Image: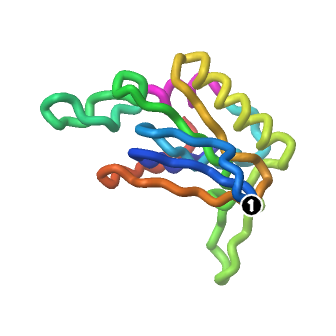
Amino acid sequence: MRVVIQRVTQARVEVDGEIVGSIDKGLMVLVCAMDNERTDFESWAKRLCGIRLFPDASGKMSEDVQSAGGSLLLVPQFTLSADMKKGLRPSFGRASSPALAAEQIAGLAAHCEALGVRTQTGRFGADMAVHLTNDGPVTIFMDKP
């Protein structure tokens, strides 16, 4: 799995003009399931819910999403698997099969919810319009834990 995490003041995902996921303060996470491998949802959920990207009273990034009163918006993004080693056209061969990827993103969302963090998702396989206000900006990239 590969993710790009952005601290946001608000974010939403629309499909055909309908809002399918929306948060205020929190983390908007682009999620790519890769290599058709089973994912350790518990480990990924703990990392996403525990990453300290929000400022404390002194301005130091030491608060996680839950202690900062935020939420998660997980957005499926298979293009994060892009391989650009050859030519100018990306290869997405490392992206998981659609059925497995949908299962992985749903599993990750369920584990984040189980940790007490309100979690919304985009719609897997849909043409999504993502709207966000990046806070900071703070953007973090993570591969497998």
Q: Residue at the spot x=66%, y=53% of the render?
A: 14
Q: Which residue is mark 1?
A: 127
Report the residue at 76% width, 47% height from top. 124
Q: Can you say whether 8 is above or below 120 in the image?
A: below
Q: Residue at x 79, y 44 (%)?
A: 36
In the image, what residue occupies the spot 75% across and 59% down? 16
Residue 99 appears left or right of 63: right
Q: Magenta segment range?
A: 41-50
Q: Position of residue 97 (x, y in %)?
A: 84, 49
Mark 1, Cα crowd under 10 Å, few <14 / some 14-19 / many 20+, is few
- The kind of residue tagged 1 is Asp
Side of 91 where 6 appears, left or right: left
Q: Quadrant of residue 113?
A: top right
Q: Is residue 46 above or below residue 54?
A: above
> Does the stretch in magenta take in 16?
no
Q: Nearer the viewer, residue 122 or 79?
A: 122
Task: Note whether 78 is above or below 8 in the view shown.
Answer: below
Which quarter shows the N terminus? top right
Seen in the picture, residue 44 relative to 36 is either above or below; the reply is: above
Describe residue 7's horizontal placement relative to residue 39 as left or right.
Answer: left
Percent x, y of residue 87: 66, 83
Instruction: Say whether residue 103 is left or right of residue 2.
Output: right
Magenta segment's dominant SS is helix
Which quarter of the picture shows residue 45? top right
Nearer-the-camera pick, 109 or 142: 109
